Amino acid sequence: MKKVLSLCLLFVATSLFAHEFWLMPSKFKLNIGEIFDLQLFVGEDFMGDIWANRKKRLLKLTHLTEGNKQDLTSIALKSDSLPIPLKFETEGTHLLTMESKNSFIALEADKFNDYLKEDGIENIYELRQKQGQLKQPSKELYRRCAKTLIQVGNKYSDIFKKNTQMPLEIIPLNNPYQMKAGEAISIKVLFNNQPLKHKMVVAWHKTATQKTTHRKLKTDANGALQIKLDKAGYWMISTVHMEEVKNNPEANYQSYWGNLTFELQ
């Protein structure tokens, strides 16, 4: 009975507090001037709920092409949760980036420790262990740093590998729209422009008819890794980084959730 209860508690902690956040366009491959919808989701396995209270929580939504940068924040803030209607008038690879404001969550010690282990946040778990804090609850501020790549027409550009200066950056070094199933995409993970070494990264995959699968990988000493894109379909690459916050009565931890979505065709 105790084992069953323990498993249930772990499931609750994971399902409630290990939520991914991602940008999901209604189409990843577009024609010039074609209208599409962008939606913001929170959940797991490419299944989730629409991100609510956008007007209070969104910091910035930006559209980048080669040589151009457009602030879409005012368009996104017209609604709290409705899809954001967009269209791109230039051919090429397009990058959308989204940053959120800080949100707050407090967890009991066991749930927080489970969350740290589930999401590969080893630096904070080891710090709590070293400082004798594993039985202490947490007060955490967290921010979202999300990207999506969209292809318009048949012209390609290098905007996909731009460092957009978000706190947590997942940067692909190959353009997925010039790749085929079975090839490996190279990824660089940065925090405040510094490589995140030995950081857990999760690669998620799904199609319209197949169940979502995922793989857990780790960056090398240079914050880099390769991910084999073994199947066509929707891909999401995610990671979480957390740091201790000192002398702040509001929180003792600050986390950053990075995410990148694209479609392999």
Image: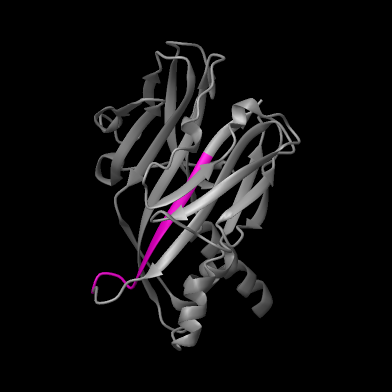
Height in image: 216 above or below 34? below
- Which region is colored magenta? 249-260
250 is within the stretch colored magenta:
yes
Tell me if I can see residue 1 in this picture. Answer: no
Height in image: 42 above or below 85? below
Q: How many marks do you count on the picture?
A: 0
166 is within the stretch colored magenta:
no
Which residue is found at the position 57% from the left and 14% from the top? 154
Percent position (x, y) of residue 106? Answer: 37, 68
Height in image: 236 above or below 12? above
Q: Main secondary structure of the magenta part?
A: strand
Tell me if I can see residue 123 in this picture. Answer: yes
Which residue is found at the position 38% from the left and 56% from the top? 192
Percent position (x, y) of residue 138? Answer: 39, 73
- Asked which quadrant contains residue 222, the reply is bottom right
Question: 188 and 95: which one is in front?
Answer: 188
Percent position (x, y) of residue 162? Answer: 44, 38
Query: Quick check: 184 left or right of 49?
Result: right
Which residue is found at the position 35% from the left and 44% from the top? 99
Question: 22 and 90: which one is in front?
Answer: 90
Height in image: 240 above or below 246? above
Say which quadrant the N terminus sits in.
Answer: bottom right
- Asked which quadrant contains residue 60, the reply is top left
Percent position (x, y) of residue 207? Answer: 67, 32
